[in-house]
Amino acid sequence: MNWEIEIVLFVCLLIAAFVSLYVKNLLTAVITLSVFSFFTALIYVAMGAIDVGFTEAVVGAGVTGVLLIITIYRTSRRSSD
Amino acid sequence: MERKKDNPIVSLVSRTVSPFIMLFALYVIFHGHYSPGGGFQGGTMLAAAFILIRLSLGMEISQLQFKSRWATPLGSAGVLIYFGTGLVALLFGGNFLDYGFIPIAEAVAERRSIGILCIEIGVAIAVMAIIVSIYDDLLEGSSDD
């Protein structure tokens, strides 16, 4: 039962990672990076490490997204390459 | 942050949700020894509640809640609480951070429980202050607030 959930979560993780790598709009990249972080937290919880998953959800999906969005507002929104 | 105009829905929702985030953060901190969570996670959630208010209501209003110049003294105070707990255990004959030697309760198990609680409060205060300070320093000198 558990490995099906983990495979679905890994597929969603890969999709979020590739979207955040290849998208041109940096704000979208930050949001998909938060989605990536949240799926990482769900994988940690599915594997039984609840404490690590909690930390990943709070830090990765919460505070890091806010700090990266501020950085985008202080610099530029479009990727140059 | 850059704010075009005041949106009543965003400000009302963030002002309503922020105290509940703080309440859950306090739950996570004070139940850190028997459930998942602890000082770092609770402190980060507390900082997220402050950052939510700063993000939605702007810098002037949120200074009423948590002033930017409080951040560095609070961070230092958190580290001092952590270090002081270890030093008290050292002064009463144990090793550094050996909670069984802190003279606050009779039973050793209760001493260890209260010692871990003091450590987690110190870590939570330090983490909360430093994350809010990082946010303020990133926004320092921007044109509108």
Image: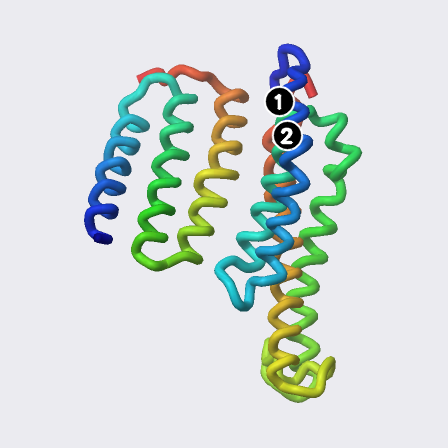
Residue linked to disc 2: B14
Q: Is residue B101 above or below residue A33?
A: below
Q: Residue furthest top?
A: B4
Q: Is the residue marked by circle 1 packed among few (<14), some (14-19), or many (20+) residues within 10 Å? A: few
Q: Is B1 above or below relative to B27?
A: above
Q: Is residue B112 left or right of residue A48?
A: right
Residue, x 70% and y 78% (percent of image)?
B88
Residue B113 vs residue A80: left or right? right
Q: How far apart are the two marked residues, 2 and 1, measured between alpha carbons?
A: 6 Å
Whether residue B96 can be seen here: no
SS at badge 1: helix
Q: Position of residue B131 (x, y in %)?
A: 59, 43
Q: Hey, what amino acid is under mark 1?
A: Val
The reply to whether residue A19 is in sight is yes
Instruction: Look at 38% across and 40% down and name the residue there.
Output: A37
Q: Which residue is mark 1?
A: B10
- Between A32 and A25, the residue placed more toward the observer is A32
Q: Chain of mark 2?
A: B
